[in-house]
Amino acid sequence: MTGGAVAEIKKGARVTGADRDKLAAKLVKEYEKGASIRSLAESTGRSYGFVHRVLSESDVTLRGRGGATRGAKT
């Protein structure tokens, strides 16, 4: 992610109002392009939980967990 409100927000600072709306819009846009919650958290300096909460509040359909799934035992 580049520039905008993301660079102006200090790590751990409370994000409210218009700043939160701008950040949420950027996170939604990047997440829908395929970015992971973890990569978004790292690039914004926020926690995984914060990013997850913001996406959930923005009514984004979250993707399932990745990785291999176990097959049925035979």
Image: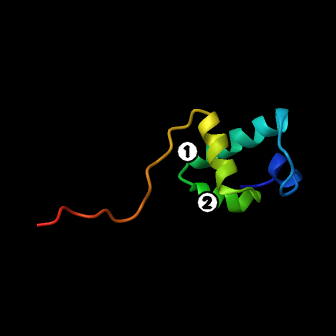
The label number, if any, that marks residue 71 in the structure image: none
Residue position for label 2? 38
Location of residue 46 in the rendering, given as x and y in whole percent from the top left corner: 74, 56
Residue position for label 1? 32
Splitting the image into 4 quarters, where does residue 24 fall? Answer: top right
Which of the pair 7/73 is nearer the observer? 73
Left or right side of 36 for 63: left
Location of residue 41 in the rendering, given as x and y in whole percent from the top left corner: 68, 57
- Mark 1: few/some/many CA within 10 Å (<14, 14-19, 20+): some
Q: How many marks?
A: 2
Q: Secondary structure at mark 2?
A: helix
Three-letter code for the amino acid on which mark 2 is drawn? Arg
Which residue reaches farthest front? 73
Which of the pair 18/73 is nearer the observer? 73
- Mark 2: few/some/many CA within 10 Å (<14, 14-19, 20+): some
Which is more N-terminal, label 1 or label 2? 1
Quadrant of the drawing holding the C terminus: bottom left
Left or right side of 69 for 22: right
Splitting the image into 4 quarters, where does residue 32 fall? Answer: top right
What residue is rendered at 62% in x and 47% in y? Answer: 52
What residue is rendered at 18% in x and 61% in y? Answer: 72
Quadrant of the drawing holding the N terminus: bottom right
Rendered view: 63 above or below 65: above
Location of residue 34 in the rendering, given as x and y in whole percent from the top left corner: 53, 52
Q: Are marks 2 and 1 in contact (CB under 8 Å)?
A: no
What residue is rendered at 34% in x and 65% in y? Answer: 68
Location of residue 36 in the rendering, given as x and y in whole percent from the top left corner: 56, 56
Q: Secondary structure at mark 1?
A: helix
Three-letter code for the amino acid on which mark 1 is drawn? Glu
Which of the pair 65/4 is nearer the observer? 65
Rendered view: 9 above or below 71: above
Rendered view: 36 above or below 15: below
